[in-house]
Image (spheres, grey):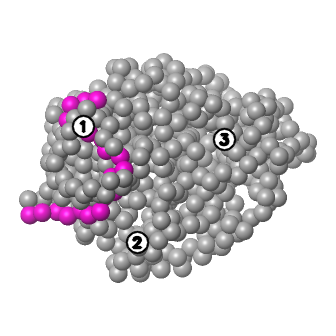
Amino acid sequence: MDTNKNSFQNEPDVVLIGAGIMSATLAVLLKKLEPNLTIEIFERLDAAAAESSDAWNNAGTGHAAFCELNYTPQLADGSIETSKAVKIGESFEISRQFWAHLVETGFICPPKNFIKSIPHMSFVWGEENVDYLRRRYEALNELPLFHGMEYSEDAATLREWIPLVMEGRPENQKIAATRMTIGTDVNFGSLTKCMFGAVKALDGVNMHFCQEVTKLKKDDSSRWTISLKDEKTGKKRKVRARFVFIGAGGGSLHLLLKSGIKEGKGFGGFPVSGQWLVCTNPDVIRRHEAKVYGKAEVGSPPMSVPHLDSRVINGKKALLFGPYAGFSTKFLKQGSFFDLLSSLRISNIVPMLAAGIQNIPLTKYLIDQVRQSSDERMAALRGYYPDAKMDDWKLEVAGQRVQVIKKDAKKGGILEFGTEVVTGSEGSIAALLGASPGASTAVSIMLGLIKTCFPEKYNSVEWQSKLKEMIPSFGKSLNEDPELCAELRSWTSQVLNLKNVVSIPEDNEIA
């Protein structure tokens, strides 16, 4: 099903495979930088943002490192490592600027359709965890990106911040929380559809659904021939393009391997499924207004950080708790149980076996998660909402994530958490692998891709000027420039109708 006014282009400049947030971001960036580019977008499903970008699957929190404790590990000497939190925070600010530019220029839909303000909070209990959170607050509070963070160990204060979390909690329990009131809830499914709706209306852009990519082959002129099959009609066709981006979520690994580029050899994937407990009681949903993140269990993967998450999905408020990890051999929620087996190659068997041996605790954790009973899942929820009643919650399947496995000279293979862009030597093809916090940092990731794959254009005066117009902090560090950080947060907050940083006294004492 074609959704654009233009006909099918057999030799476009760019082909984008997958209709998620990454392809949408890249399409908009490229058309803004080079309006004459022709782009064809292909998606195997019958709608955009139906897999990882969908709000009910994995995406949702605007990951700015305000509350995610796995981004700020405690080192052996007791200090807190903040570099990853700063990197992710910087990346999310870049996304905010890009979205604000698109809204301000009238290119995309109103911000209420995809983003809203909501406090981002970290919550812990127990002496050791409280000590960690206090150290984390002290480390982050000195950084401009985290200006406005509040910390408290006072039960009365926390009852004001998160009443649901405090109801039924033992009075003598040692607790602590941090709060950033400028946190956001982002519906990346809505944002993706909004961006595609705008870009497909431009000349030279076509979007096609129910199109399965069956083959990728580079010819002697360094162009790529992409073989396609219509999932509804069975019709086959081919297109030739100068540049191909594989942004197909869990499906990217198979397509990268099909491309045959040497840079893709040795890459494998480890699929992890997820589940949510979804609240069905409107009164409970109404009484919680925050994203409350805790500490992951020892031995659990970083993406399993538990959180009691208030969201707005399709215009309706929702409350989720999880994620509960699981295992499936599928690489996509709407994929095949043979995905893992069919991804095996001679070049990646050793890295995958090595990564498996090194991550036996993770395997045990996943087995334990799969075997969890309803009572055990509720026990985890009651750590964050002590008065939770089983009748108010139902279990729903979330999305699939495929963690990156790649070669390592010393270990044979390693399991990576996060995202990775694999680019061909000539820059004519690139694939995005991995998961969180991908959606929130999509603009930064795509800027890096453009820099690698279009180096001459990227460094040109014209493109540099346009990038600075779309992203005012382009080429600068907001964390090293407090005034610029404050100025741009004020601008994006105004354009996107978000809360801005409130003034926090410099001598803010721990309550």
* Above/below status of 479 relative to 254: above
**What residue is at 32 percent from the left and 37 percent from the top?**
3
- Give the label on residue 343, or none: 2
Instruction: Judge from the rendering whether residue 56 lies leftward or rightward of residue 451; answer left or right.
Output: right
- Give the label on residue 309, or none: 3
- In the rendered image, which quarter contains the C terminus? top right
Mark 3 and mark 1 lie on one chain; the one further toward the N terminus is 1
Report if residue 216 lies within the magenta region. yes
**What residue is at 34 percent from the left and 20 percent from the top?**
105
Mark 2 and mark 3 lie on one chain; the one further toward the N terminus is 3
Give the residue pinned by disc 1.
205
**How many C-alpha atoms fall within 10 Å of the one at disc 2: few (<14), some, or many (≥20)?**
some
Whole-percent x and y of residue 18? 36, 50
Instruction: Judge from the rendering whether residue 21 lies leftward or rightward of residue 368; answer left or right.
Output: left
Separation of marks 3 and 1 at Cα, in angstroms: 37 Å
**SS for tag 2?**
loop
Res 93 → quadrant? top left
Visible in this render: residue 30? no
What main secondary structure does the magenta stretch of the protein show? strand
What segment carries the magenta color?
201-220
Whole-percent x and y of residue 135? 66, 47
Visible in this render: residue 53? yes
In depth, the one of 79 and 120 nearer the eye is: 120
Separation of marks 2 and 3 at Cα, in angstroms: 34 Å
**What residue is at 55 percent from the left and 42 percent from the top?**
55
Whole-percent x and y of residue 500? 55, 23
- Under mark 1, the amino acid is Val
Whole-percent x and y of residue 412? 42, 78
Which is in the foreground here, disc 3 or disc 1? 1
* Above/below status of 298 relative to 381: below
**SS for tag 1?**
strand
- Under mark 3, the amino acid is Asp
